[in-house]
Amino acid sequence: MSRSVGTLTRADLAEAINRKMGFSRAESLDMVEAILEHMCGALRKGENVKISGFGSFVLRDKKERIGRNPKTGVEVPITPRRVMTFRASQLLRERIAKGG
């Protein structure tokens, strides 16, 4: 399977599992889906997700605040919301900096 330039997809992850671990393509895709669903479920419950050596998906609750329309300058309230951020681990940052 040829990988899209600049984008790693679910299919690419499943293909890597298929090649390295020897599982069938269907089993590999099921594994990827199960892992992603487990992560999404934890985030839906308000839990953070930490993958050692990779990084952390962290949920933050933002309070209501006043924003400004940059075109008109009119103040607009920004509603409170929950956002997810990703913080790369030091190991991942070092690997990326080295180029691999």
Image (cartoon, grey):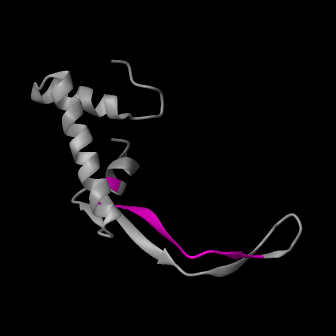
Residue in the picture at 87% in, 73% down:
73
Rendered view: 22 above or below 9: above
Residue in the picture at 20% in, 25% down:
26
- Where is residue 54? Give x, y as percent: 28, 55
26 vs 10, left or right, is left
Residue in the picture at 31% in, 59% down:
55
16 vs 61, left or right, is left
Tell me if I can see residue 99 in this picture. Answer: yes
- Where is residue 52? Give x, y as percent: 21, 59
- Where is residue 77? Give x, y as percent: 71, 77
Magenta region: 76-92
Q: Dividing the image into 4 quarters, which one contains the N terminus?
A: top left
Rendered view: 4 above or below 58: above
Q: Nearer the viewer, residue 83 or 8?
A: 83
- Where is residue 7? Give x, y as percent: 45, 34
Q: Nearer the viewer, residue 64 or 3?
A: 64
Tell me if I can see residue 89 in this picture. Answer: no
Q: Is residue 40 magenta?
A: no
Q: Nearer the viewer, residue 85 or 88?
A: 85
